[in-house]
Image: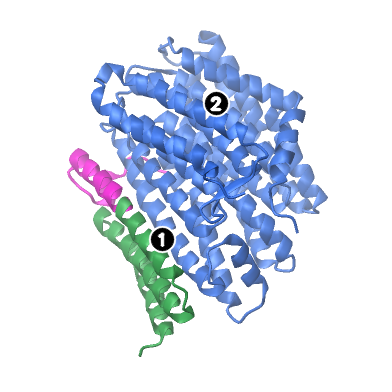
Chain colours: A green, B blue
Amino acid sequence: MIQPIYFIILSLIIFVLGIIAFFIKRDLITMFMAVEVMLNAANLAFIALTKAIGIIDGQIIVLFVITVAAAEAAVGLAIILLIFRQKKTIRTEDIQVMKG
Amino acid sequence: MNSIMAAVPLLTVVVGSLFLLILEVFLNRENKSYLGYISLTFLVICGIICTSFWNKDYSYFNGSLHLDNLSIFFYIISLLTIGFVILISLKYLFLQEANHGEFFALILFALSGMMIMVSSTDLLIIFLGLELLSISSYILAGFRLKDVRSSESAIKYFLLGSFASAFLVFGMAFLFGISHSTSLLAIVQHLQSGTSFKLIGFMGLGLVLAGFGFKIALAPFHMWAPDVYEGAPTPVTTFFSIGPKAAGFAVFLRFFHIYWHSLESSQAIFWLLWVIAVLTMIIGNLAALRQTNIKRILAYSSIAHGGYLMVAVLAQDYTSLMFYLVVYLFMNIGAFSAVIALSKKNKEFLELDDYSGIGFQYPWIGALFSVFLFSLAGFPPTGGFLAKFYVFSAAVRQGLVPLVIISVLTCLVSVFYYLRIIVYMYMKEPFHTVDVYKENPALFLVMFLCVYEVFQLGINPGSILVLIRQALISLPVF
């Protein structure tokens, strides 16, 4: 059997990859996918920890997080669609109007 | 006491928003403002129920939903915020072509998210409340469907908000790993009992703090705030500047009350928060100096006020924290409603140049706006002065003198940009004609209520302090 610690390390790697993808990609859908990857990395960590410590709570938390991610996806894709209707593009540099 | 009654205020709001969603289908475009009055009715009912539960101390769902005095106090703050936001948006939505009935349902969903956040001591439930608040906020930010700025603010808030949520969940996984639970008390106890996983625990705590810091716009995580505040419809901006902050600081209050008592020796988190507070105050105030858009100025000012609230958290003085939140609620809603007052059909006056000569052209709006700006800057005899005074004196009592010196200096900087608006209003010739839509009784009701409260809290704060002390009794004693 593979030890849970390897899954925790894997989840850390996926999380960091998600952060990197969020910062280097210039496309709204891909950035959103990077966030989903990060959330799923956290889910993997929860499941591995549940296995390691033997308390079932962690797997229930995963169900909650998946629900939240689904709700976020519904809203987020609607907002991206709204932007696409207005500008006919979803590249971040093309939709920037306000400057900090 | 375990009782279903603890969930009744929350259920009132949720039932209200579902009812509004159904009713919205049957109303035609002209009658949408009835939804606003119905949502206000639900808020009043919820308020009455809340006040009747004062000192009752119910809890439900295995203790993960507490209706103690502290929750009720924050319920009332949230209800007042949402009530005022609904009142100031009644005419605004109609004038700015954002008259979709879902607005009121969504804002009640956001309210229920805030209520879940402030009344729970379980990190998972707090996270769910935060997401309910955030997801409703993403939609509300993009509510002016034809305006590109509004959509841009929605997408920025959505992407960065869900990015921060991912950090929060990952931090929660670490904390769950070391403490085998998501309850705040258990987490702090396991951080304290020096196991070998202490470092992982503090990493998790850092990630969770980063997630919350984003939601309440603390300094390294504040980048989204000015753009989102500028693009969102103004009543929604009003809500963003108060609602998530109040709920976030309620969570901080519950968490750090346990944390400071159990881990006095652990200085790492203290200095981390110290640096965050200083950065927030400095960046918020300095960046506001070079803004010319009134909503961006108020956005940076609200970031800076987050820094002063952080000082109260560091000073471990929760009376002053809650007093500051109450005063901040009234003065910020007042200032934003003055901004909303200067708008007409499909046009808002948001640049600083538009405000030149407003003080003589519209004496009421100018005078009331000036009062709110004086209060935000912290002049006596307004509430803003007393709020800052309580926070800073509590920090001095805790021996945080360098922090207080930095705070006072940043306060002095902030006077410049608040007074600049007043100088524009009273000492400049009108740049061009500004004609506003004046028949807006609900908005003026909000402004007069806020100005009354700003002076009342500044001159006679006794009664509210008694309430705050009664609310703080419900915190666990060590």
Q: In this view, does B240 lie above or below A68?
A: above
x, y percent for residue B208: 52, 61
Question: Relative to residue B83, is residue B192 depicted above or below?
Answer: below
Q: Which residue is drawn at 34% across and 42% down?
A: B154
Where is residue B347 drawn, in percent x and y? 35, 21
Q: In which quarter of the image is residue B258?
A: bottom right
Q: Which of marks 1 and 2 is in front?
A: 1
Disc 1/disc 2 C-alpha distance (Å)? 34 Å
Residue at (35% x, 52% y) in the render: B159
Is A73 within the magenta? Answer: yes
Q: Per the image, is B51 magenta?
A: no
User: Alpha-carbon neighbours of circle 1 within 10 Å: few (<14), some, or many (≥20)?
Assistant: many
Q: In this view, does B397 lie to the left or right of B470?
A: right
Decide: is B424 above or below A27: above
Q: Is the magenta stretch mostly helix, strand or loop?
A: helix
Tell me the number on the disc at residue B335: 2
- Percent across and percent down for residue A19 are 38, 65
- Give B446 or B393, whichever is nearer the viewer: B446
Q: Which chain carries label 2?
A: B
Residue stretch rendered in magenta on the structure: A72-100
Residue placed under numbered mark 1 in the picture: B166
